[in-house]
Image (cartoon, rainbow, N blue to C red):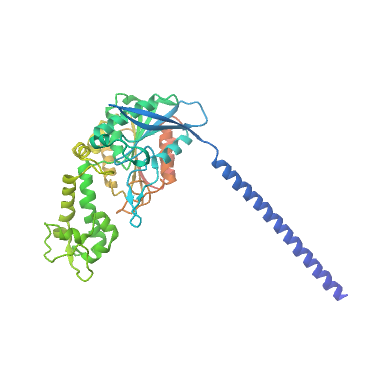
């Protein structure tokens, strides 16, 4: 009898175990099928078109033309609010993939940052905007100079006029509402769109300008900061570990970030620097057994100062560097801070700025915000982003890294433009910008 009970118990246990096993497999099978179906759906969604595009040619005058592209939503006949994207300095195409070109130390090949204007155009067009972007004059396929004469003789005013012409093309596209136009510029492009808002004969049609890490100081001051002030700040904050006003030549020569900032091997620069007070001979390449200390103010400072002066005097027209004609037209311009008061009060102003911007320090954005507040400009917003650099990508305060713009930055941009383009209530969307941003923001 006991044996029968044990046998029955075992049988029931086996039956229960088998039942649980079958149920578990069935659940897993269902889950797997669900996950697989979701995966298939996700893949299918990737191929659903969300924007349309049309390639254009912009006549810049004097026989010069450049390629452009407009993107707009798939659904709806429009007309849609329009956005013009204006690139910053350097050899850049419509996707804005040419700014901050770097050379791989190992392979010697060029490293291009992501195409941030393509990213912005895609994001905004998917959400209801028509966006125009264009190649900079003289730029050809694969970021080459298509016309060396155009590139060599280009001035800053040429680029401003090119943006004017691109704006006129955008306004006359059938998909675009000419009464709801915003213009967005990055770095030098931010300086440019400010001028367009002031000088454009169709100013009344410009509802908004957006300044992404805009150049706010004079270009000459920006260059001095990059070539002189930034290396000295790094030396004082990072290399001067004893806080005695001097740094080790050995450590400075081994610090790759410092070498990149100062623009070469520090011992080689010192050995050829006529203003240096160092009397001990230095080899072109540093020897670890020949360590000396460099006083930051009396010895180091003169090196980047002289380098900055020499660069301005000896600039040659070598791609992707700017040509002398362009630099001369740029260096004496009034700053964005000086001219921002001339932007019409009817034009909304959005400023997005990385707090680790080593190209245009965030303190300049604060000054611009203060200036607009002083002028009682009725509609301006500043959003700053911790840990983001000059391309609105995570960067240290010493070097600009490149990568896709974070989604929260794009969400801030869209929410503000949405509220200023008649999609939603201005007050509601303005509050939305503040709530969704992982930034410190100041709004007026």
Identify the residue shown where x is 22% and y is 46%: 223
Q: 308 or 385: which is nearer to us? A: 308
Identify the residue shown where x is 11% and y is 65%: 279
Q: Is residue 148 placed above or below 232 in the rendered structure?
A: above
Indicate the quadrant where residue 43 lies: top right
Q: Is residue 173 left or right of residue 203?
A: right
Rendered-image quadrant of the C terminus: top left
Q: 99 or 272: which is nearer to us? A: 272
Q: Is residue 189 left or right of residue 73?
A: left
Q: 63 or 308: which is nearer to us? A: 63
Task: Look at the image and tell me whether residue 444 can be seen.
Answer: no
Q: Is residue 137 left or right of residue 223?
A: right
Residue sitting at the far bottom: 2
Q: Is residue 155 placed above or below 239 in the rendered structure?
A: above
Residue 393 position, x and y percent, is 38, 48
Q: Is residue 16 left or right of residue 376?
A: right
Residue 153 position, x and y percent, is 23, 35
Residue 249 position, x and y percent, is 21, 64
Rendered-image quadrant of the N terminus: bottom right
Identify the residue shown where x is 28% and y is 61%: 255
* Number of on-image labels: 0
Q: Is residue 343 placed above or below 355 in the rendered structure?
A: above
Q: 27 or 117: which is nearer to us? A: 117
Residue sitting at the far right: 1
Residue 312 position, x and y percent, is 18, 45
């Amino acid at each position: 009898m006991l044996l029968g009970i044990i046998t029955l118990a075992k049988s029931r246990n086996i039956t229960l175990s088998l039942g649980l096993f079958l149920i578990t497999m069935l659940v897993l099978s269902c889950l797997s099928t669900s996950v697989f179906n979701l995966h298939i759906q996700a893949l299918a969604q990737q191929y659903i078109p969300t924007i349309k595009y049309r390639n254009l040619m912009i006549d810049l005058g004097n026989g010069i033309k450049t390629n452009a592209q407009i993107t707009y939503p798939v659904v709806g006949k429009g007309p849609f609010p329009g956005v013009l994207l204006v690139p910053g300095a350097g050899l850049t195409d419509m996707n804005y993939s040419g700014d901050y070109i770097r050379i791989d130390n190992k392979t010697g090949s060029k490293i291009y940052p992501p195409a941030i204007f393509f990213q912005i155009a895609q994001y905004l067009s998917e959400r209801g905007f028509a966006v125009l972007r264009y190649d900079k004059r003289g730029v050809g396929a694969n970021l080459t100079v298509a016309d060396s004469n155009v590139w060599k003789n280009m001035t800053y005013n040429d680029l401003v006029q090119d943006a004017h012409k691109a704006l006129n093309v955008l306004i006359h596209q059938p998909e675009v509402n000419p009464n709801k136009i915003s213009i967005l510029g990055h770095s030098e492009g931010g300086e440019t769109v400010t001028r367009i808002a002031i000088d454009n004969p169709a100013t009344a049609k410009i509802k908004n300008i957006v300044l992404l890490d805009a150049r706010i100081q004079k270009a000459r001051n920006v260059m001095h900061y990059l070539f002189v002030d930034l290396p000295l700040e790094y030396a004082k904050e990072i290399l001067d570990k004893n806080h005695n006003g001097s740094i080790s030549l050995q450590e400075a020569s081994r610090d790759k970030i410092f070498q990149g900032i100062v623009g070469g091997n520090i011992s080689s620069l010192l050995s050829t620097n006529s203003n240096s007070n160092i009397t001990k001979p230095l080899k072109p390449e540093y020897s670890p057994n020949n360590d000396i200390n460099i006083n930051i103010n009396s010895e180091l400072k003169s090196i980047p100062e002289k380098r900055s002066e020499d660069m301005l005097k000896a600039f040659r027209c070598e791609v992707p560097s700017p040509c002398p004609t362009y630099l001369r037209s740029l260096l004496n311009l009034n700053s964005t801070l000086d001219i921002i008061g001339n932007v019409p009060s009817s034009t909304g102003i959005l400023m997005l700025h990385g707090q680790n911007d080593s190209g245009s320090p965030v303190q300049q954005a604060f000054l611009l915000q203060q200036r607009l507040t002083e002028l009682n400009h009725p509609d301006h917003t500043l959003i700053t982003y911790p840990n983001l650099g000059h391309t609105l990508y995570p960067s240290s305060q010493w070097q600009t890294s490149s990568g896709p713009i974070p989604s929260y930055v794009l969400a801030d941009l869209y929410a503000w433009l949405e509220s200023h383009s008649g999609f939603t209530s201005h007050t509601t969307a303005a509050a939305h910008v503040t709530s969704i941003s992982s930034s410190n923001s100041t709004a007026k």
